[in-house]
Amino acid sequence: MKKNGLALSSMVVALIALAGCQATGENYAANVYKAGQVNARQNAKTVNILAVMPAKIEVDNTQAKQSAQIFGAVLGAVAGGVVGHNVGSGRAPNTAIGAVGGGVVGAAAGSLVKDTTLVDGVSITYVEEGQTFNSAQVGRSCEFSPGMAVVVSTDANETRIQPNATCPVETKG
C-alpha cells in the first residue's frame, strides 16, 4: 500500500508542476530574430524615446499547454498502472484500467494550463519625425531609457525598438 501512496503523491506533485507551465514570451522581444531575418537587410531609423513604462503582454501558451497534456497523460498512465497493479493484486485488467484512467486524469490536468499567459513588457512612447507614437514591446524596463534608439522594421507596422540600455548583472552572494 505504501507504493500506491508514493505513486499517487508523485503524480500529484507532478500535476501541480504542470500548472506552472508557461510561455516566457522571450521570442517576441525586439532583439530576437527568426532565421530568415538574419543577414537580411531591414529598414532602420532612429527615434527619441520619451518614456518607458511597465506593461503586460499577452502571449500564446498553446505549446506549453499541449506539452502539459502529453506529460500529464503519460505520467497519469504510469501512476494509474502502478496503482491498478497493486490494488488488483497484479492482475492485468486492473493494471490496464488504472493506466487508462490515470492517463485520462493526467491529460485533463494538463488541460488546466491556460491558452495564453501574461509576460513582462514595456510601453515605449517615442518621437519619430515630429510625431509621437507608442509601442508595446516584450522586454524589461531596464533595457530601455529615454533618449536615442534604433527602430528596425521588416513590416510596415512593425516597430522593433532596440534596447538602448543594459540591465544590471545579478550577482549571487
Image (spheres, helix red, strand yellow):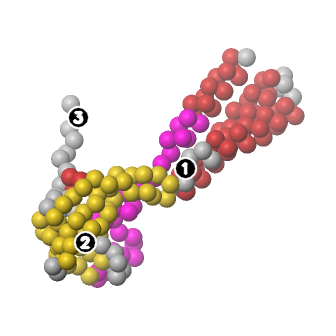
In the rendered structure, the answer to whether residue 102 lies left or right of residue 48 reads right
Q: Position of residue 109 (x, y in %)?
A: 64, 41
Distance CA(mark 2)–CA(mark 1): 32 Å
Task: Look at 67% across and 45% down and name the residue there.
Answer: 107
* Count of numbered circles on the image: 3
Q: Which mark is residue 133?
A: 2
Mark sitting earlier along the chain (2/3): 2
Q: Main secondary structure of the magenta part?
A: loop
Q: Which residue is mark 1?
A: 114
Instruction: Say if 5 sits above or below 68 in the image.
Output: above
Q: Which of label 3 and label 1 is nearer to you?
A: 1
Q: Which residue is mark 3?
A: 172
Instruction: Say if 133 sits above or below 20 in the image.
Output: below
Distance CA(mark 3)–CA(mark 1): 33 Å
Q: Position of residue 48 (x, y in %)?
A: 15, 70
Label 1 is placed on what type of residue? Lys
Mark sitting earlier along the chain (3/1): 1
Q: Which mark is residue 38?
A: none
> What is the span of residues highlighted in magenta in the rendered image?
15-42
Q: Position of residue 67 (x, y in %)?
A: 58, 50
